[in-house]
Image (spheres, rainbow, N blue to C red):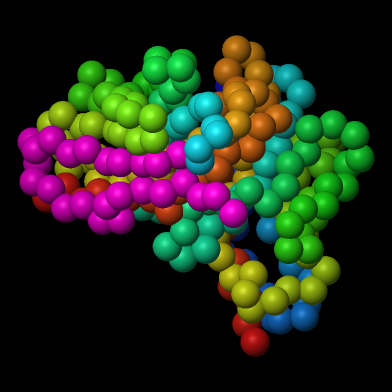
Amino acid sequence: EPEVTQTPSHQVTQMGQEVILRCVPISNHLYFYWYRQILGQKVEFLVSFYNNEISEKSEIFDDQFSVERPDGSNFTLKIRSTKLEDSAMYFCASSVLAGLSYEQYFGPGTRLTVT
Amino acid sequence: AQSVAQPEDQVNVAEGNPLTVKCTYSVSGNPYLFWYVQYPNRGLQFLLKYITGDNLVKGSYGFEAEFNKSQTSFHLKKPSALVSDSALYFCAVSSGGGSYIPTFGRGTSLIVHP
């Protein structure tokens, strides 16, 4: 069964550094998402992406965040200048289509630790 | 605004016993409800969803969930728990209003004891 993959599984970085989290969505999916989960808290939506454009974003997704689909398979989340509070598990997800009834398929996550 | 509450951080059940993981929601329109499961070192995996129709929804691995509109609940159930069901379970809701993005709960850790 096809899966969403994410790399790296764990990233440790110093405050102020840039990080890029990588994801390979399921190949025939058209919509891509990033979520994060701070330890012990809810899974929070960051951004959705379709047709090389951001289709929706949350208040969390401020100017320090950006997303890109640099080629036909990868989907990346960049954090320009990391803060301690960015430490979280970051999940990538994809769906065939977007809509209320379509489930999303998630990757295993990247644990980001900012020191 | 939409929200989901999973009132239990952890549920413990003996293998072979029935299990229930609770979820309540709040939306302004019709709810679209989902359950996901997360095994260690894996991503969230879709279990089942309620869109419309029968209130009892059957999903993967023998799980089912009952939509109760009057109680705004969507509890996850399984008649006989397995040790391998031990995982983190997330309830999610979406309801339109211009966005199809689901809102997730905090997750409930299910521990099934042998």
Report how many numbered discs are placed on residues in the image.
0
Does residue B90 sit above or below B34 in this rendering? below
Observer-nearest residue: B34 or A5?
Answer: A5
**Residue at the image point whose x is 64% and y is 70% from the top:** B85
Give above or below for B32 relative to B48: above
Q: Quadrant of residue A24?
A: top left
Residue drawn 60% across the image and 31% down it: A96
Q: Is residue B19 left or right of residue B43?
A: right
Image check: A34 left or right of B30? left
- Is A11 inside the magenta-drawn segment? yes
Which residue range is magenta in the image?
A1-25
Vertical comparison of B44 with B73: above or below: below
Quadrant location of the N terminus of chain A? bottom right
Q: Nearer the viewer, residue A67 or B27?
A: A67
Task: Indicate whether A25 appears above or below B45.
Answer: above
Q: Inspect this view and state whether residue B67 appears.
A: yes
Q: Tell me if I can see residue A37 in this picture.
A: no
Q: Residue furthest bottom?
A: B114
Query: Percent position (x, y) of residue A41?
Result: 42, 47
Magenta run includes residue B75: no
Q: Residue furthest right?
A: B54
